[in-house]
Amino acid sequence: MSSQFTTPVVTEMQVIPVAGHDSMLMNLSGAHAPFFTRNIVIIKDNSGHTGVGEIPGGEKIRKTLEDAIPLVVGKTLGEYKNVLTLVRNTFADRDAGGRGLQTFDLRTTIHVVTGIEAAMLDLLGQHLGVNVASLLGDGQQRSEVECSVICSSSVIAKPHRCRIKASRMTHATGIACVMKKR
């Protein structure tokens, strides 16, 4: 049985480490460091689409993402669950130390799998013409959410910057970020 549609194939995967200044905000693990690090995963397919995932930074995670490239490139989007299992199993030894005592999960492979999954789901959603939320759990549940926009002390004096940040969140996620006034 032939089909007029073909499933896109992953043609390229890039890993881009990024860093930037962070505000001194408290979280469950203590205060933020003055800098943040993240890894951006960019996956392209043969239909011209680009999917993006973002995960915590760090050299172990970056290196494992790079090591995973041959396991991802050449696979179809329909195989994404098998790809994730292959990555999880191939690099399971890198999580031998467990989660760690922090509230932040210190494992490597779980973050690597998450970054690849986010980028592949982004591609799959583009192929199917739906947003990623439609592919998860019970599908998209809402199109608008209340949110808190955290603005650093340098922004507090300029409330319009908080509105711009909320607008960017809406643009990036497709979900309206409705700010409550106090």
Image: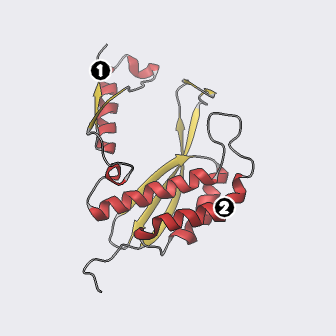
Give the residue displayed 47% in from the left and 73% down from the top: 75
Percent coordinates x, y for residue 98 in the rendering: 71, 46
**Furthest-bottom residue in this view:** 1
Circle 1 residues within 10 Å: few <14, some 14–19, many ≥20: few
Seen in the image, is 87 located left or right of residue 100?
A: left
Near-viewer residue (20 or 84): 84
Please state the total of marks drawn on the protein image: 2
- The residue sitting at 34% across, 37% down in the picture is 169
Query: Seen in the image, is 13 located left or right of residue 87?
Result: left
Query: Residue 91 bears which disc, if any?
Result: 2
On screen, residue 85 above or below 19:
below
Q: Earlier in the sequence, mark 2 or mark 1?
A: 2
Residue 144, percent from left and from top:
26, 35
Report the amino acid beneath label 2.
Answer: Phe
| Amino acid at dot 1 | Lys
**Residue 113, percent across and down?**
55, 56
Quarter holding residue 5:
bottom left
**Which residue occupies 41% across, 68% down?**
77
| Secondary structure beneath label 2 | loop
How far is mark 2 from mark 1, CA to CA? Answer: 44 Å
Does residue 21 appear to the left or right of 52 in the view shown?
right
Q: Which residue was labeled with disc 1?
A: 180
Which residue sits at x=58%, y=67%?
A: 86
- The residue lying furthest to the right in this view is 97
Residue 166 appears at what percent x and percent y?
Answer: 32, 32
- The quadrant the C terminus occupies is top left
Quadrant of the image containing the N terminus:
bottom left
